[in-house]
Amino acid sequence: MINYVIEKIESESLKDNVVGDPSTREILTFLPPENDQKPFLLIELAGLNWKPVISNKFGQIIGKLFSSKKLKRSIVINPNFKTKIYVNQYINSPILGSYENFIINELITYFREKYDVEKVALFGKSSGGFGAYTLAVRHPDIINGFANHFGDSCFEYMYIQDFLYTNKLFRSECVKNWLNSVLKGKQLSEDEMRAVNVIGSAFFYSPNLRSEIMSDLPIDLETGGIEVETWAKWLSFDPAKNVEKHLESLSKLKGIYLDVGTKDEYNLFVGIRTLHKKMAKMKIQHKYCEFEGGHFGNSSRYEYSLPYLEERLSEQL
């Protein structure tokens, strides 16, 4: 039987956010079998459909890794990172809350103090993969490794279809009224989720509280054309564009894992391949894999990345 508890943190960093998301967050915490070594902490950056259950796919994978002893000393946590806009890029937002501060200053501190954690790694898929990379390179003295599963990168390939749908949607909808309805829980179509992805990303990459939609968009809603200055702000967050700036940080990390599906529907094979190639050129040690598959239903990839992270964290480098 897998050993787990649900921790609860009252976050100062998420308090009084503009959209009214809760500042008290629950953390589903999977505890390893008894071990006489200090534990590692592996943090999943996901939770957009978070529920405090262990019977889902994620819980089954962690149970399997513990029972097979592929994970021996890692506490694995699945925090509730849900937002009303559905999107979370895991950096600070003046609209949704300071998630970077929450993770780095509050979440990790809590687990270090309670469980005497020795080292920390982040892992996640899609936006979570982006967040794992981004927080690791910004905080290499706190984060010791990361697994980036088909995370956002090469933005020009992944956002283009979402930009087109967003432009079409708001030629017939009032964007302010539509956004208010989303924040109130409106049921969304698949196409509307594309627009949510654009506006939700803007809450992190180009927030503007003076705007009626609290952000600047990288497209002109009338024409669909690119707004160059705002798009440049977005690209500054793109791992494929900023990786060279983080050579020193990447060199400090003990474990880096990248993978992507060859049929990824958001073209993220372009971004992850680019990231891999640039890291290899920079002589950054990392593990890179491609698998046959698309963007969804790939939690099983954690069966490869988490043991790799624990192994790398265990090594005396």
Image (spheres, rainbow, N blue to C red):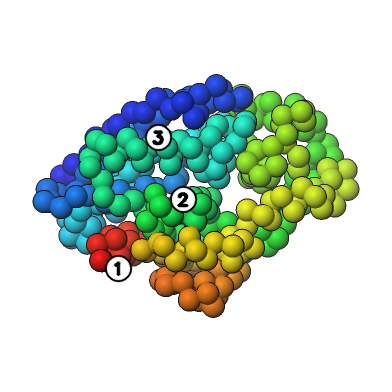
| Relative image position of residue 10 (x, y in whole percent) | 40, 25
- Determine the secondary structure under disc 2: loop
| Relative image position of residue 229 (x, y in whole percent) | 80, 50
- From mark 3 to mark 1, how far is it between C-alphas? 28 Å
Residue where numbered disc 3 is placed? 106
Q: Earlier in the sequence, mark 3 or mark 2?
A: 3
Q: Nearer the viewer, residue 292 or 124?
A: 124
- Determine the secondary structure under disc 3: helix
Residue 139 image label: 2
Disc 2 to disc 1: CB gap under 8 Å: no
Q: Nearer the viewer, residue 165 or 126?
A: 126
- From mark 2 to mark 1, how far is it between C-alphas? 19 Å
Residue placed furthest toward the right: 223
Figure disc tally: 3
Amino acid type of the residue that numbered disc 2 sits on in the rendered structure: His
For the point 30% across and 31% down, which residue is it? 7
Amino acid type of the residue that numbered disc 3 sits on in the rendered structure: Glu
Kindly tell me whether residue 4 is visible in this rendering.
yes
- Determine the secondary structure under disc 1: loop
Residue where numbered disc 1 is placed? 317
Q: Nearer the viewer, mark 3 or mark 1?
A: 1
